[in-house]
Amino acid sequence: MEVSSLQLKTYFNMLSEAKFNILKQISGEFSRDETIWASGYLAGLAGAPVGIASSPQVPHSQSETSRKITLAYGTETGNSKKLATELAGIIKKKGIQVKLADLSQYKPKDLIKEEFFFVIISTQGEGEPPILAKKFYDHIHENELILNHLKFGVLALGDSSYPQFCKTGEDIDSRFEILGAERIIPLKKCDIDYEEEARHWIEHVFEVTAKASSKPQLSSASKVATGRKKYQGKVSGIINLNDITSDKETYHIEIETDESISYQPGDALGILPFNPRNVVDEIISLTGIDPEKQIETPKVTASADELLYKHLNISYLLKTTVAHYAQMTGHHIPETRLGLLDLLRIYPIKNAEQFEEIITILTYQAPRLYSISSSPEAHGDTEIHITVAKSEYYIDDQKQNGVCSGFLSQFREGDHLEFYIQQAKHFKLPQPDKDMIMIGPGTGIAPFRSFLWERDATGAEGRNWLFFGDRNFISDFLYQSEIQDFLKTETLTHLDVAFSRDTTQKIYVQHKLEQKAQEVFQWLEAGASLYLCGTKDPMSKDVEETLLNIIQNQGKRNKEEARIYLEEMELNGRYAKDVY
């Protein structure tokens, strides 16, 4: 950079002539690298608090400062981004250059320029990548890249209650190896309660990338904020929203707290359910184990009764857990998923001592997330609502209740429970003056109830269009009176409903979308945001296929152009899904 005579005079006047001559003499003997370091050192002193200048830090070695890493994250709920941001802060403090990259925006062709590439990524649904990271995921799997120069590590976040636990992270890890990259940190798979394991991975990343440092300070990793805020709540109201003629049970649950709850519409409420008391008692009776026997597991040491009741998954064991059980007991058990009680009945254990060993192989109970259906502006910051469908499934023709939905459906007014808030990074209200289309059959209505109450309370000017569906109008129209009130006050501009069992030919929300195809596309073209919430299979896939057809037909686009149109809406934050 050329320095003007005016700038030079200004700089000179800041120093006495003697000091300026000394500076010229010293700097004249510097190499280029020494000059760069000295300029950075002096700049650091200029910005340092009083007292630091007298104790300058030892400069990092050239090999350390030249070492650069890229830390990429793929996220749906924001956990991966949070971890990546914390890790980047730690590494930067150690003098290592870090580039933080969102996989939704990262160009895969830039992989050939990388040296160290670390990935933190979650798995969604049945083993799928986060929506915004799918393009990156598809690119590395569909193209034969040459990554012999790349050193990598993967931290996979997932939920062990799903069969495809951490599958996205596993896929990326194995694909990078196939493409020739060098794995310098083993794949780390973390469950929902990921904080402790993620902290160890963070330490490992620092160890690997900071080998050139003569004094690595691993203790900094322990400063990472990991815990999530837990709230103590009391059930202030619980009501079954379905009519007595319905074969479904959907509960509206209101929870009060003594402290303010920090959340936004679109966020979810997390609850760790307890197992059915009668099932736990029967397991203890069947195995003969002392319920007060203290047992140590990798995460928790507690009595057998407490572990089975509060901490461990006993309702629908993973196939891997069943296989491990078979190996320990000597039984030949075909690949299957069973509840622990049925497993014990069909394939008995030898004695209570063997059951103590069985307890240590059980996975931990995973929190369940429910879309929040209240609004902080409309309902206050010490009250929160959720909408819970009591789920049922069958194992060997025997009906079972969902662990958490069954747990919550048994609550009564005055009962206490603990919960936390899971922020939704991509499922948020648009600006107050922007229009939105909400597609939420069944309990998919939950976040849209929150959206409508919030927009009503804040006087948002944007138009609101809701597509809702369920089985029967009379028995299953969730929040019917509220929705009708929103129509009367024009908070809700348009409402289209589909009740599949009320007609000879089943009508679903996607059929209602087809009927309004021209107007739906006009809204999208005018900048409306689009939201989809509810069951993944088959609802969300059918709805998305319908949306693509609408864009293709109304927008005069081919199939690929329609897909790109919807993808661009998603990348721009105008299309968001919360499916399960």
Image: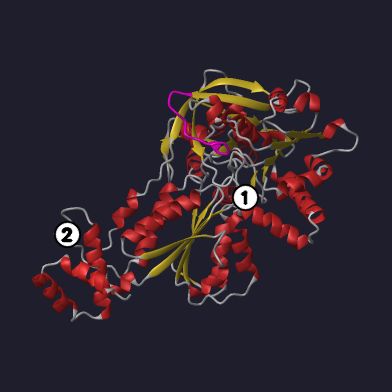
Residue at image location 70% in from the left, 27% down from the top: 483
Q: Is residue 551 magenta?
A: no
Residue 235, position as x, y percentages in the image? 54, 22
Categorize mark 2 by other alpha carbons within 10 Å: few (<14), some (14-19), many (20+).
some
Q: Which residue is mark 2?
A: 53
Residue 413, position as x, y percentages in the image? 56, 18
Q: Which residue is mark 1?
A: 163
- Is residue 167 rendered to the left or right of residue 530? left
Residue at image location 67% in from the left, 48% down from the top: 527
- In the image, 238 versus 576, the foreground residue is 576
Categorize mark 1 by other alpha carbons within 10 Å: few (<14), some (14-19), many (20+).
some
Q: Which residues are magenta?
A: 257-269
Q: In the drawing, what numbered circle is on residue 346?
A: none
Distance between the alpha carbons at the discs numbered 1 and 2: 56 Å
Residue at image location 79% in from the left, 32% down from the top: 471
Image quadrant assignment for residue 283: top right
Residue 559, position as x, y percentages in the image? 78, 60
* Residue 235 against residue 498 in the figure, above or below: above
Q: Secondary structure at mark 2?
A: loop
Q: Are marks 1 and 2 in contact (CB under 8 Å)?
A: no
**Kind of residue sitting beneath label 1:** Pro
